[in-house]
Structures are given as structure tokens and as C-alpha cells.
């Protein structure tokens, strides 16, 4: 039987329009594929953003923690260091308080006599003239500052007393301000017995009555103190030395005027060093 051409066309059209058998998959259209990729990319970016935000929050928290520790360390350091200690007050220009007071007096005298800075060695004539003036100043000071004083000090425990017949040599430590002056002295055995206790020199303060004679001198090679001030300086080119002729030593009274902390033993009971 022959089928007309029109009938064949109808059958082909029907087959084309018929649904696919069950279980078969149709390929997605290009538009559907593009939408799925975009959604996956969006999800990936959202996860990445969430991870980055978590890292940022953790970094901010760490910064705050470190800042708190830094502030606490700075506060603790300030408490440990405290406020800077004020400089010690200057030693009064009073020769009666000790070698430091005598030095301050000479320094005040120098400043009144030489208010200007000394000339430079590059001007030889002016420098030599200044040295002559300094020598005149030293001669006058060595004469005018001789006096009897009573200074408070201690027997130097690092230098044992030395007996020589009826004389005893020892070292006295005087402290004025931040300075410490160690001065050799010699007194009679009877005088030294007054600062003995239990067969040894007392540890407390002693009152030293003596005649002090300044021996300041000009040193053209010493314009300043230098790294080690073995000899104190009155001023540039002027060194401070003195002699101490000790007449007597006794235990110093306490600050409130009461009896000394280490009273001298009764006469005749002390043992010579």
C-alpha cells in the first residue's frame, strides 16, 4: 500500500513532538547552564567573604589585646621608675659643716671674683694674665679661710687605725651632699680612746675639732674635672686641697641632742688599737 507524501510528513512531525522515553535526560539549554554557574560562583564568593570577615575580626581582637598589654606594660614601667628624683640640693657655702661647705664657700668667692669665663689658651697673653690672677686668688684664700672647726664624720672602717707610740693615725670620712672626703688624721692615744668601745673604734659619728688650712692651687693643665675627679676643683684651673690639724675627737651627739649612740668608755678602760 502506498502512503501519500502528506501522511509521511504528518508522522515525522508527530515523532519530533513526542516526549522522550522515561529515564532519558535532555541536555540543558545554554541559558540554564549559565545560571547554575553564576549561582555556584556567588556561593563561593560568599563563603570566601565569610572566611575573610572571620580573619579580619580575629585580627582586630588580637590588635586590641596587644594594645591592652602595651598600655599595662607602660603603666607598670611608670610605676617602677616613678618620677625622676630631684637633683640633690647644693651644699651650703658654710665652712663649719665640713669640707664640702668649705669648698662651696671658695667656689662662691671665685664666682664673685671671676664672673666671666676664663680666656682660652689660644690667647696666650690673656691666659697667662688669668693664671696670675688665679694665683693671687689662691694665696688670699689659703690665708683668709684658715679657721678652727668642728666637723662631723666617721672613722673609715676600711683603714684600720695605726698606733705609733703615743700617737694614733686613722682616716676620717666626711660626707657633704653627694661628696665624700677621706682625710688622714693623727691624734694622741688619750684623745683617740674617747672614740673606742669594746677595744675597737666606734661605728657611729664622731665630732672632730681641728684647724683647717686650705691649700688650693693653680693647675694650668686642668681646665675641668675630667672623668675622675681625684682632687676636687674650685673652678677651672683651681684645685681644692686642705690640711686638717685635728685637736680632739669625741662621739658626736645624736641629732636630738641626746647622748651619743656609742658613748665613749670611762677613762682608763679603753684598749689601744
Image (tube, rainbow, N blue to C red):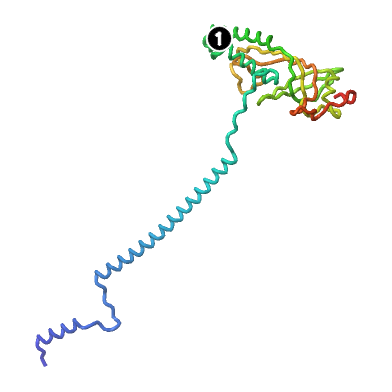
Q: Is residue 98 left or right of residue 25?
A: right
Percent across and percent down for residue 218 are 63, 12
Q: Crowdedness of circle 1 by 10 Å Cα count: few (<14), some, many (20+)?
A: some
Q: Is residue 206 above or below residue 55?
A: above
Percent across and percent down for residue 229 are 64, 21
Q: Which residue is most to the front?
A: 257
Q: Which residue is mark 1?
A: 127
Q: Could you tell me which quadrant the C terminus lies in?
A: top right
> Which of 77 and 223 lies nearest the eye of the viewer?
77
Q: Residue at x 46, y 55 (%)?
A: 58
Percent across and percent down for residue 89 are 62, 26
Q: Which residue is most to the bottom?
A: 1
Q: Could you tell me which quadrant the N terminus lies in?
A: bottom left
Q: Is residue 243 above or below residue 51?
A: above
Q: In this view of the protein, can residue 158 be seen by the observer?
A: no
Percent across and percent down for residue 207 are 77, 22
Q: Residue at x 15, y 86 (%)?
A: 11
> Which of 27 and 63 lies nearest the eye of the viewer?
63
Q: Is residue 102 above or below residue 201?
A: above
Q: In this view of the protein, can residue 14 be seen by the observer?
A: yes
- The answer to which image quadrant residue 238 occupies is top right
- The answer to which image quadrant residue 54 occupies is bottom left
Tally the numbered discs: 1
Q: Residue at x 48, y 52 (%)?
A: 62
Q: Which residue is most to the right?
A: 268
- The answer to which image quadrant residue 133 occupies is top right
Q: Is residue 263 left or right of residue 80?
A: right
Label 1 sits on a secondary structure element that is helix
Q: Residue at x 52, y 11 (%)?
A: 122
> Which of 76 and 23 lies nearest the eye of the viewer?
76
Amino acid at each position: 500500500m502506498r502512503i501519500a507524501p502528506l501522511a509521511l510528513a504528518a508522522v515525522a512531525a508527530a515523532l519530533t513532538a513526542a516526549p522522550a522515553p522515561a529515564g532519558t535526560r535532555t541536555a540543558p539549554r545554554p541559558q540554564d547552564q549559565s545560571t547554575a554557574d553564576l549561582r555556584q560562583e556567588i556561593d563561593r564568593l560568599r563563603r570566601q567573604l565569610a572566611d575573610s570577615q572571620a580573619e579580619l575580626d580575629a585580627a582586630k581582637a588580637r590588635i586590641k589585646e596587644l594594645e591592652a598589654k602595651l598600655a599595662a606594660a607602660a603603666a607598670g614601667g611608670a610605676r617602677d621608675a616613678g618620677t625622676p628624683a630631684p637633683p640633690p640640693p647644693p651644699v651650703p657655702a658654710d665652712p663649719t659643716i665640713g669640707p664640702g661647705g668649705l669648698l662651696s664657700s671658695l667656689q662662691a668667692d671665685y664666682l664673685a671674683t671671676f664672673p666671666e669665663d676664663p680666656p682660652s689658651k689660644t690667647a696666650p697673653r690673656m691666659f697667662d694674665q688669668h693664671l696670675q690672677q688665679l694665683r693671687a686668688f689662691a694665696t688670699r684664700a689659703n690665708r683668709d679661710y684658715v679657721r678652727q672647726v668642728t666637723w662631723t664624720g666617721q672613722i673609715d672602717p676600711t683603714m684600720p687605725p695605726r698606733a705609733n707610740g703615743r700617737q694614733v693615725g686613722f682616716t676620717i670620712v666626711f660626707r657633704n651632699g653627694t661628696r665624700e672626703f677621706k682625710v688622714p688624721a693623727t691624734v694622741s692615744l688619750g684623745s683617740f680612746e674617747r672614740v673606742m668601745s669594746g677595744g675597737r673604734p666606734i661605728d657611729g659619728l664622731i665630732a672632730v675639732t681641728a684647724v683647717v688650712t686650705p691649700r688650693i692651687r693653680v693647675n694650668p693643665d686642668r681646665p675641668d674635672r675630667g672623668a675622675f675627679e681625684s682632687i676636687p676643683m674650685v673652678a677651672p684651673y683651681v684645685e681644692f686641697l686642705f690640711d686638717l690639724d685635728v685637736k680632739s675627737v669625741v662621739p658626736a651627739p645624736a641629732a636630738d641632742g641626746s647622748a651619743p649612740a656609742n658613748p665613749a668608755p670611762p677613762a682608763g678602760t679603753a684598749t689601744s688599737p
